[in-house]
Amino acid sequence: MSGMDAALARNHAFATAGGHRGATIMPALRIYVITCLDPRLDPAAILGLELGDAAVVRNAGGRVTDEVIADVAFIGQLAESAFPDGPLFDVAVIHHDQCGTGALADDTFRAAYATRTSADPATLLDRAVLDPETTVRTDATRLRAAPAVPARVAISGHVYRVETGLLETIVPAAGV
């Protein structure tokens, strides 16, 4: 049985048990998580999230890109319709140590990857997570400065420690 076959069997059990019922488009905990695609950093597992608790976007390094800003703005637009007053939701930017994007700091790797993806090598170098405390500060600041992100969104930055499984808050939650 392949990995996907096993996952499909789990999905069948999930659907049969009704695990999908009651989930809504707006996250129940009003949390939006931006994090790395590394399988050691599964937001549902490390934050104890259930289906429908949070919106999650994952990319290499958990970096705040233009696309991520647009996604936060989209959810913000939806949330403003649902919640006309008060805070909209929290955004948690989570980076981690031992991140594979560190390979982007290697000139040979970066050049080959840039060729493969038609990306700008300088942009790729900026996406490397070598010091997660620094990059999470940079990304939380970038998200807070984005004009498209509603002011009623609270943004925080955290670093996940792979060896301990613990999150460390680097940037306390604050509005835009």
Image: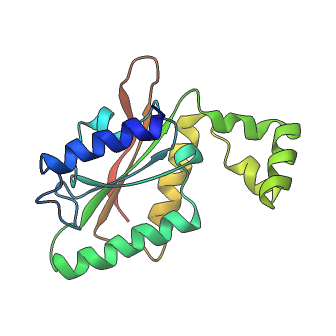
- Position of residue 26 measured from the top left corner of the image (x, y, whole percent): 22, 66
Q: Quadrant of the C terminus?
A: bottom left
Examine the rendered structure and indicate whether residue 99 appears above or below residue 149: above
Image mark count: 0
Q: In which quarter of the image is the N terminus?
A: top left
Residue 37 appears left or right of 125: left
Judged from this view, the residue extending furthest toward the top is 163
**Residue shown at the point (21%, 52%) measured from the top left:** 53
x, y percentage for residue 113? 80, 48
- Quadrant of the rendered image containing residue 7: top left
Query: Could you tell whether 10 is left or right of 119 in the image?
Result: left
At 55% from the left and 36% from the top, the residue drawn is 132
Colour scheme: rainbow
Residue ranking furthest to the front: 1
Is residue 131 something that shows in the picture? yes
Residue at 16%, 57% (x, y): give it: 28
Residue 91 lies left or right of residue 38; in this view the side is left
Query: What residue is rendered at 20% in x and 51% in y?
Result: 15
Q: Which of 88 and 28 is in front in this view?
A: 28
The location of residue 126, given as percent across then percent down, is: 71, 50
Whether residue 130 is visible here, answered yes or no, is no
Quarter assignment of residue 46:
top left
